[in-house]
Amino acid sequence: MILSANKSVTKRKQALDFQQLGLSEETLATLAEVGYDRPTPIQAALIPLALEQHDLLGQAQTGTGKTAAFALPILELVELKPNKPAAIILTPTRELAVQVSKEVQKLAGKRQLSIVCLYGGKPMQGQTNQLKKGAAIVVGTPGRVIDHVKRGNLSLNEIEFAVLDEADRMLDIGFRDDIEYILKRCPQARQTLLLSATLPPAILELAKRYMNAPKMVNFSLNKVAADTIDQFYLLVPDEIKFDILLDLLKREQPQQAIVFCRTKLGTERLYRKLFKSGAVNGLGTIHGDLAQSSRDRMMQDFRDGKISCLIATDVVGRGIDVTGISHIINFDIPELSDDYVHRVGRTGRMGKTGVAFTLVEPLQRSELAKIERKINRRLELDPMQTHVDQMAEEKLGLKPGAPPKSKYRRAL
Ligand code: ADP
Ligand code: MG
């Protein structure tokens, strides 16, 4: 008995090839061209089921290739009907909509498919014109998609595929009614795919109401933060966080870094201060108060490597995929432990190594403990702590004798 159970596990573990998943020659050729040698585990699991036209609920940690997992089956199954979109992909943020549409475009290869990306903060007209020319696949944020539906620019009557990407995040943001509005207007005989890092009751409820006997594909394995990411923290009084950030950047010389702050205002302030200091070359910032055109430009410059250090709110914490990111610095510890996981997940993508640092203010130790419980792992105290303590004493007159290491920590 045990033997056969083991056997089946080994069998399942054997890496599959894209050739074994039921994809067309055309798609296989594109995959070779874009350099995807092997499917990721979630792709190997999802693609065959999606090609059999099942509704699917996919749960997997970030950076596991979920986009291609839904994009490839869509590209195989979508029938071209000019003016009649056959697939709609909803994402929580504008940046993610752009990224997903680029990935779909890349995977479409030589297929003559028009992919239109709809998101707010941009004039309607350009998007309307694109829709008028005919769109096979629409990617967008729920609000803007609804705008186009209401104005009669976009018809959902012929949708064969609906995808909810980062579904838990969309519900967090409050897109529930918008998602329902859209799904209600799609034909019932469609295929629905839902991707989410977590499956809280609200997601399961949505699945029950709008999906048809969905199959679950779970790859979360309780491994919320990738193993390839080294994670450190420093206990730093608010007054000297900026100095310590400078020292950290100087020591680490990141190839590319995202520095996360909690608020839009804090992000803008830190950006200006860093800019003035002249300490960082290739500095950028992205947050919700910036015009969409600047947000787009910043993201593009970051992808192109023109920006090496991006100061950001959690707006880029989800789903954004830039492979060169070597460092995540939490200038402010995130309010929600989930956000920690998503921020840190921006590095260490696709098996690369990455490192994350979190600056913890003295009164935030319990928040650190909460994160550690969430990821079921302790962050390591960075050796620079001695330097921080010295500076705290010199600048703020804080007595050294800071509590010994063990007292910094709370029991998990
Ligand atoms: P997720 O949505 O799970 O966070 P993404 O779909 O954004 O992950 O994919 C992460 C990165 O991996 C992207 O840069 C993508 O181009 C790349 N990628 C996806 N699948 C493969 C594959 N089979 N081989 C190589 N790279 C891949
Ligand atoms: Mg994704």
Image (cartoon, rainbow, N blue to C red):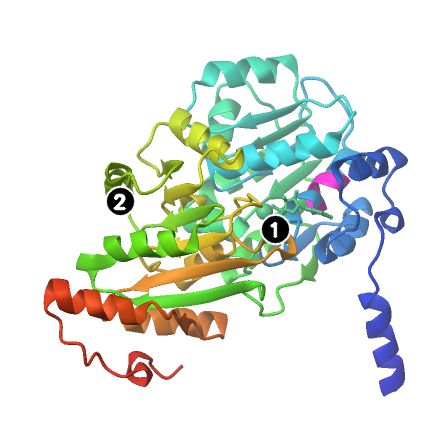
**Percent from the top left, x then y, of residue 69?**
71, 47
What residue is pinned by disc 1?
195
Residue 44 placement: quadrant = bottom right
In this rendering, the label closer to the viewer, 1 or 2:
2
Q: Give the percent coordinates (x, y) of residue 176.
A: 47, 46
Q: In this rendering, would 333 be left or right of 71?
A: left
Q: Residue furthest bottom?
A: 1
Residue 391 sits in quarter:
bottom left
Q: Quadrant of the C terminus?
A: bottom left
Residue 152 on the magenta span: no
Which residues, given as a range, are shown in magenta? 69-73
Task: Name the amino acid type tagged 1.
Answer: Leu
Please give the name of the residue rendered at 30% of the width and 73% of the height, measured from the top-left corner: 366
Q: Is residue 17 above or below residue 29?
A: below
Report the residue marked by disc 2. 270
Residue at disc 2, CB closer than 8 Å to ligand 1: no
**Residue 364, visible in the rendered structure:** no
**Closer to us: 331 or 78:** 331
Number of disc labels: 2
Is residue 194 something one can see in this rendering? yes
Question: Foreground residue, 208 or 12?
Answer: 12
Name the side, left or right, on which 19 lies relative to 169: right
What kind of secondary structure does the magenta stretch mostly adopt?
A: helix
Q: Is residue 64 depicted above or below 306 in this figure? A: below
Q: Is mark 1 within 8 Å of ligand 2?
A: yes
Give the residue displayed 53% in from the left and 57% down from the top: 354
Q: Position of residue 335 (x, y in %)?
A: 33, 59
Of label 1 and label 2, which has the lower sequence position? 1
| Amino acid type, mark 2 | Leu
Which label is found at residue 41?
Answer: none
**333 over 401 or under it: above or below:** above
